[in-house]
Image: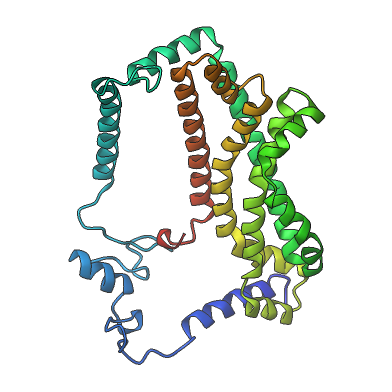
Amino acid sequence: MTSSDPVTAVQRSGTRNAHDAAPHPGPSLRSGRPSPRDGVPATQGVAGSLSGERVPSRDSGEAGEGQSVLVVPGASRSSILLGSLGFGVVFLLAWQLVPPALGVPSYIIPTVTDLAREFARMAARENLAVHVFSTVTVAIAGFIIGSLLGAAMGYVLGMSVLIEKVLSPYILGLQIAPKVAFAPLFIMWLGYNSWPKLVVTILVVFFPILVNVLQSMKTVDRDLINLARAYSMSRMQIFWKIEVPASMPALMAGLRIGATLAVIGVTVGELVGGNTGLGYLITFGEGQANTAMVFDAIVLLTAIGIVLYGAVAVMEARVLHYIPRALR
């Protein structure tokens, strides 16, 4: 038996268990719907009955290998895009017209044109590009470092019950402690530079990924692990061939959360004691009673968070391409 035979045997066994778990003599009496063993694809029985259209089954190969298709009546990409753009246009028009109509002064709620004029002034006189670059750099660096540390610690705790029980109280205490409270300490220890912002961002990103990975390690199929041990697979082989693939969906979910929290972490650091960045512009605009500057900085921070989240979503689609879209 070669070195790859145990892994192949484990995978084949898992496939046989999935198909032969229970006999299917006929249609389900409880649901009243035909099962795939009855010759009618499950997706066609559910989605087809709703839309009145034939839905290709996974086994037929029409929808692509490993993918399931769900037909939503009256919905398409173009209609969804047009609906989103239409809602955005209506929202901007309401923002532009409603506050002046209600007599709200511009220093309370600036209009869209006020934000555009202030944005142009900030780009020309306030070194806006430098502040955006500082925030983006720290957010990406903190996200990457926090993700690596959180995933590594989650896998270590998941592989050793003893280490988890020893370190869990301290990790829980550090997680419960408010991260904003640490920012002044980091400023006193590290000075008024980018290091306090980076450390706060790492702490904020670290815990969601740690919790997701650790939980996924606890829910790995124990029968599959026992079967791998029966084939004399080593601990590291079990980790790389079974536990890591099983934890990928939870890890990607943690990365999605971490991508948005990274922007929050860097903003907290800049608000408390930064001298550059969009968080600093928020503090500066507040001191100058420049509401338009504050709104512009918030919009830019939101855009940065959306871009980071979208990058993680694209990576997730490539990594988890073998999982049907509806199950992710």
Front-most of 146 and 301?
301
Identify the residue at the far left of this view.
Answer: 52
Question: Is residue 59 in view from this perspective?
Answer: yes
Q: Is residue 240 above or below residue 35?
A: above
Q: How is the image coloured?
A: rainbow
Is 235 displayed left or right of 33 in the figure?
right
How far from the left and from the top, in percent, is residue 38? Answer: 31, 84
Question: In the picture provided, is 167 more to the left or to the right than 41?
Answer: right
In this image, 154 relative to 41: left or right?
Answer: right
Pinpoint residue 294: horizontal percent, then vertical percent.
49, 22
Figure check: 108 above or below 199: above
Residue nearest the observer in this picture, 87 or 109: 109
In the rendered image, is residue 53 in sight?
A: no
Please name whichever residue, 177 or 89, is drawn nearer the observer in this view of the structure: 177
Instruction: Give the residue displayed 77% in from the left and 34% down from the top.
Output: 185
Residue 132 placement: quadrant: top right
Vertically, is 77 above or below 223?
A: above
At x 47%, y 31%, the residue is 303
Please state the horizontal and vertical placement of residue 179, each as a whole percent of the image: 67, 42
Q: Quadrant of residue 278?
A: top right
The furthest residue to the top: 125
Q: Position of residue 298 (x, y in %)?
A: 48, 28
Residue at the image position 31 percent from the left and 61 percent from the top:
70
Q: Is residue 218 above or below residue 154?
A: below
Position of residue 247 in the picture relative to residue 199 (left or right):
left
Count how many numbered circles sit on residues in the image: 0
Please name whichever residue, 312 or 63, is drawn nearer the observer in this view of the structure: 312
* Residue occupying the point 43% across, 18% down: 292
Residue 258 position by quadrant: top right
